[in-house]
Amino acid sequence: MSKPEFDQYAADYDRMLKEAMPSGLGESDYFAEYKVKLLARLLGGVAPRRVLDFGCGAGRSLPYLSQFFSGAECWGYDVSPESLKFAVQAAPRARLSCDWDVIEQQQFDVIFAANVFHHIVPADRVGALERCRRLLAPGGKLFLFEHNPFNPLTRRVFERCPFDADAEMFSLGQAREMSRQAGFSQETHGYTLFFPKPLAWLRGLEPLLTRLPLGAQYYVQMAS
């Protein structure tokens, strides 16, 4: 995940994502909120004190993290300084950095990594997970969200996104194996993003569907 790559896409990221998505699915912000709301449900009412959006990009998820975890200190990390210029506009109260030395001085109750790891070179993914694991406070959890490569609509969007041209999706099974290799001793998982915005009224059914490999994305909840 190189700085030049995402620096050059920062200003046009939202436009390119919108153009890649078929009409009628809903705005990208709808899916950002979808995942953070699921994160809150998975935490079962536990209120984290400090949350890290790992690979926050232009900050699409940060306003929802601040909304659903209003008592938490929200942080964002990304390798792209240009992206963080947009993130600070989206979430002016969040603490943002592209310096890993700054981030690793903190401990986080929750680390949220949404659609980040497919941009990391496969050989480096376990190492990145290990570095995140070391940031977790006692009892902390990491939540990895990624594209489901077996969903044809997801693959279509992925293949149309210019900033995904050099990326490589990976399956839920591969993500679970990465979790094990990175030293996490506990994990739970499921599929998500079953309902686009026109079908948002059906989202209450999602807890019944998490084992079906039909969702647009999947999640893995990891803990040491």
Image (cartoon, rainbow, N blue to C red):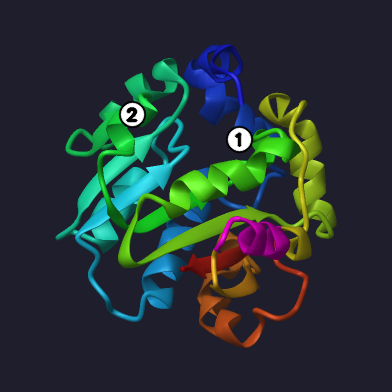
Is residue 189 visible in the rendered structure shown here? Answer: yes
Marker count (numbered) = 2
- Look at the image and give the residue range highlighted in magenta: 175-183
In this rendering, the answer to whether 95 lies above or below 198 is above
Residue at the location (72% across, 44% down)? Answer: 22
Q: Percent from the top left, x then y, of residue 217?
A: 66, 59
In this rendering, the answer to whether 40 lies above or below 10 is below
Crowd rating for badge 1 (residues with CA inside 10 Å; few <14, some 14–19, many 20+): some
Residue at the location (42% across, 60% down)? Answer: 36
Please name which of the two marks, 1 or 2, marks the residue nearer to the observer.
2
Amino acid under label 2? Answer: Asp
Query: Quarter of the image containing the N terminus?
Result: top right
Q: Percent from the top left, x then y, of residue 157?
A: 75, 42
Instruction: Name the residue nearer the viewer: 181 or 24.
Output: 181
Instruction: Name the residue nearer the viewer: 6 or 187.
Output: 187
Q: Percent from the top left, x then y, of residue 35?
A: 49, 60
Q: Percent from the top left, x then y, of residue 108?
A: 30, 54
- 78 within the magenta span: no
Is residue 29 visible in the rendered structure shown here? Answer: no
Disc 2 target residue: 101
Which quadrant would residue 199 be assigned to in this image?
bottom right
Q: Principal SS element in the magenta part?
A: helix
Disc 1 element: helix
Which badge, 1 or 2, comes first in the chain's sequence?
Answer: 1
In this rendering, the answer to whether 143 lies above or below 118 is below
Instruction: Identify the mark at residue 18; answer none if there is no mark.
Output: 1
